[in-house]
Image (cartoon, rainbow, N blue to C red):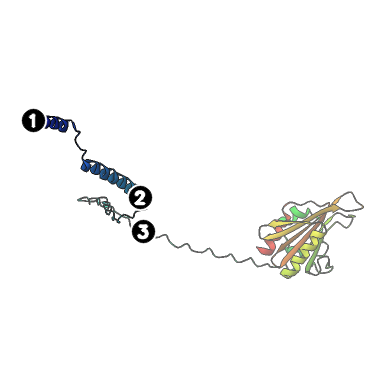
Amino acid sequence: MLVSMKQTVLDRAEDRRPAPRRRGRRAGIAIGVIALLGLGATSGGVALGMIPQPFTASAPAPSPTGPAAPSTPAAAPVQEIPDPVHSPTPTPTPTPTPAAATLPSDCTGLVPASERDRLFDGTPLQDPSGTAHLRTAAAPLTTALSCLWMDPSADVSGLSIDVGTGTAEQISAFETTLVERGHVCSDRGPARVCTQTRQAAPYPVDTTDTWYFRGTTWFEVSQTNFPTNGLLDAVEQQIWG
């Protein structure tokens, strides 16, 4: 009986002893924590570029599809192009030949016979030949005729016409001299005309000098208290036609 009671006490004591802890569970938990720490460190290294990653080539971008070619209409409209029109080649205008000058043989030929009475009003012509008293006011130009219409009883009133020739250079230089003396020059058709009006001292009347140059021929009209109308046109017609 004592033996049975002792055995019973031992059995109860055995039942009250706490069960020993399992070491395997603790080891599993430790391994799990270490694995989590290692995974975190690996992810951080990848994020910081400390751990190289294998290169993965990106897939090529799909090539763009070009626009569809426009469809050709079944029947395009026909365009009629007119034949080019050729313009005729203009014919060059020939340069007119300057009229040749013909000097009158004497003073009576300076104006048309039908115009003498109207222009000179019966004033006598002093030297019809025009060569008895050649004036030299136009030098170095050559004077061929010197004609004078003047009343012998007049003091200063009268009209004279000188006619002559010269080279183009001489005429150009003489025109420059006239401008220096106060003449005003301008174009008159194919000619150059220089004029000046001054007082015929000591008389209270004016003297007007008119020089007419055309080509290599010239004439000069000097009139004092002797008005005329159309005299230049009349002389021009007689010399150049």
Label 2 secondary element: helix
Can residue 162 be seen at all in this image of the molecule? no
Name the one closer to the observer, 108 or 183: 183
Does the CB distance between marks 1 and 2 fall below 8 Å? no
Disc 2 crowd rating (10 Å Cα; few below 14, some 14-19, many 20+) is few
Does the CB distance between marks 2 and 3 fall below 8 Å? no
**What residue would you read off at disc 2?**
45
Whichever of labels 1 and 2 marks the residue nearer the N terminus, that label is 1
Whichever of labels 2 and 3 marks the residue nearer the N terminus, that label is 2
Rendered image: mark on residue 192: none
**What residue would you read off at disc 3?**
84
Q: Answer with left or right where residue 13 lies relative to residue 208.
A: left
Whichever of labels 3 and 1 marks the residue nearer the N terminus, that label is 1
Spatial separation of the CA atoms under disc 1 and disc 2: 69 Å
**Image quarter in which the C terminus is found:** bottom right
Question: Residue 173: horizontal and vertical position, in percent?
Answer: 77, 66
Amino acid at circle 3: Pro
Name the one closer to the observer, 196 or 53: 53
Question: Residue 33: horizontal and vertical position, in percent?
Answer: 28, 43
Question: Residue 8: horizontal and vertical position, in percent?
Answer: 11, 30
Label 3 secondary element: loop
Can residue 201 be seen at all in this image of the molecule? yes
**What residue would you read off at disc 1?**
4
Spatial separation of the CA atoms under disc 2 and disc 3: 83 Å
